[in-house]
Image (cartoon, rainbow, N blue to C red):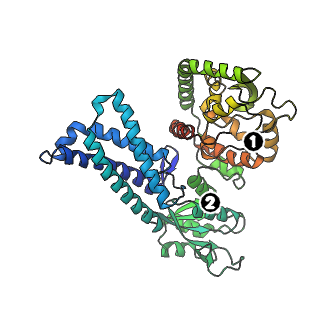
């Protein structure tokens, strides 16, 4: 995999997305050449309309993204995928119509657009069929072998089996002995026994990487064999690091303090912190001004719909354990926890008001947190701010929970966009895996990724409760 801006990127998926963008550009270019006349060369024609073609390409790929057509985990029948493609083309048409209304100079031509749709559907369907074949044939996937068959190895195997595109092809699994009574196969993977021939297996199977997924390394760690692999140009990756790069989260149940200490990441330079704070300050100030009319309307609607204040305030734990007051629009009845005490919100929570359901769905209830960002208590992107009561409870049960407080909490975050709303200790553990990944690999580019994905979630109305 390629590492860029502290993120691991699948080469195969990168080629797929860039290739699809080029095909969309080609489809519109061919349609333009077909409509405008074949006497003009394609290059001279593109010299005049390339920016219009590029606009259509960008809008089309955004529509594909918002329809989950770039999600490797997306499941569905061929009919469902075809429906999503057609829906994406429809959204592209509507979006372009709106843009052309305000920016008529960018209109490329009615007939060109209609002819483009024909080429577009043909190219997109063909390209995705080829991509499906590439995944099934494991083309452009890095060959690797894995050492170990215990819990960590099974977690990795599960991830491989449930994800369509990891850009890794595990050809064999090597275990120390036949402790499971296996007959040469484990979950469909070829199985070898004994750590004395790791290098020979790696060479014979022409692998680029060896993944060391051992739950217990003391006394059995194959130092000589792995060193031989390393000095002969074969990558050696520990299982916890491999799990991190292919899932975007840390396996907190398995990692040791020494792994956290010696692994890459957790860089927090004064420059990056200053830039992040400056962006938070300027953007929150701008949004507070622009959204103030809408926020006033929402406040009035809340007051008219139910008794109690429009704003809801609550103590939350911020950076370095500092407790601050968080502000949100009230979406529940007043004094919702008067009898129950601190509890997580549940699905279809009866305490949520009619107006509350709407503002939660649209995430409008989060708008007052812009004031917290402006003050410096929070950032736009970071771990979800938690209440002191739950922090105390979860800190006793979940390893490394306190490490999430080494950065400012955020209105949105890596855990929020990667995992659905959580309302249990199990959910808190799963979210911590993503939070620690963010703390370890945070950067301005990653923040932009989170914001971009958040916009998609909000527009599609997902994950609210």
Q: Which mark is residue 392?
A: none
Q: Tell which residue pokes out farthest to the bottom in this image.
A: 183
Of 204 and 16, the residue lying toward us: 16
Could you tell me which quadrant the C terminus lies in?
top right
Q: Are marks 1 and 2 in contact (CB under 8 Å)?
A: no
In the rendered image, which quarter is residue 436 located in?
Answer: top right
Of 185 and 265, the residue lying toward us: 185
Mark 1 surroundings: few (<14), some (14-19) or many (≥20) residues within 10 A: some
Picture residue at 67% right of the left edge, 53% below the top: 251
Q: Which mark is residue 346?
A: 1
Q: Is residue 139 visible?
A: no
Q: Relative to residue 76, is residue 432 depicted above or below?
A: above
Residue 257 drawn at (x, y percent): 71, 49
SS state under label 1 = loop
Picture residue at 51% right of the left edge, 61% below the top: 77
Q: Relative to residue 313, is residue 49 depicted above or below?
A: below
SS state under label 2 = helix
Q: Relative to residue 181, is residue 261 depicted above or below?
A: above
Gap between marks 1 and 2, in whole Å? 35 Å
């Amino acid at each position: 995999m390629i590492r860029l801006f502290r993120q691991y990127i699948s080469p195969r998926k990168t080629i797929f997305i860039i290739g699809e963008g080029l095909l969309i550009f080609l489809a519109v270019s061919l349609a333009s050449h077909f409509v405008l006349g074949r006497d003009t060369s394609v290059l001279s024609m593109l010299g005049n309309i390339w920016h219009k073609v590029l606009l259509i390409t960008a809008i089309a790929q955004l529509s594909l993204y918002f329809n989950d057509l770039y999600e490797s985990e997306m499941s569905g029948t061929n009919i469902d995928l075809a429906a999503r493609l057609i829906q994406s083309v429809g959204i592209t048409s509507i979006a372009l119509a709106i843009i052309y209304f305000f920016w008529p100079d960018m209109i490329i031509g009615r007939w060109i657009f209609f002819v483009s749709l024909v080429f577009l559907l043909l190219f997109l369907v063909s390209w995705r069929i080829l991509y499906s074949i590439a995944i099934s044939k494991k083309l452009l996937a890095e060959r690797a072998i894995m050492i170990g068959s215990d819990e960590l190895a099974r977690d990795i195997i599960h991830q491989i089996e449930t994800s369509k595109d990891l850009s890794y092809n595990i050809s064999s699994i090597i275990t120390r002995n036949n402790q499971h009574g296996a007959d040469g196969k484990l979950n469909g993977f070829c199985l070898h026994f004994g750590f004395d021939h790791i290098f020979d297996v790696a060479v014979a199977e022409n692998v680029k990487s060896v993944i060391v997924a051992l739950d217990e390394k003391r006394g059995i760690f194959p130092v000589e064999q792995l060193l031989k692999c390393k000095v002969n140009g074969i990558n050696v990756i520990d299982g916890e690091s491999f799990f991190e790069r292919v899932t975007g989260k840390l396996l907190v149940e398995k990692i040791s303090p020494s792994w956290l200490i010696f692994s890459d990441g957790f860089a927090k330079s004064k420059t990056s912190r200053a830039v992040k704070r400056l962006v938070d300050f300027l953007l929150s100030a701008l949004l507070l001004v622009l959204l103030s009319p809408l926020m006033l309307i929402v406040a009035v609607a809340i007051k008219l719909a139910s008794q109690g204040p429009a704003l809801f305030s609550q103590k939350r734990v911020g950076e370095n354990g500092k407790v601050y007051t968080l502000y949100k629009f009230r979406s529940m009845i007043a004094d919702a926890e008067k009898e129950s005490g601190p509890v997580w919100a549940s699905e279809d929570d009866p305490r949520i008001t009619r107006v509350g359901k709407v503002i939660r769905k649209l995430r409008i209830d989060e708008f007052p947190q812009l004031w917290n960002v402006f003050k410096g208590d929070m950032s736009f992107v970071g771990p979800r701010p938690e209440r002191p009561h739950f922090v105390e409870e979860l800190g006793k049960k979940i390893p490394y929970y306190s490490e999430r407080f080494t950065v400012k909490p955020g209105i949105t975050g890596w855990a929020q966009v990667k995992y659905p709303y959580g309302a249990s200790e199990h959910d808190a553990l799963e979210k911590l895996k993503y939070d620690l990944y963010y703390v370890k690999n945070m950067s301005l580019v990653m923040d932009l990724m989170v914001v971009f994905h958040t916009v998609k979630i909000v527009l599609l109305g997902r994950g609210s409760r």
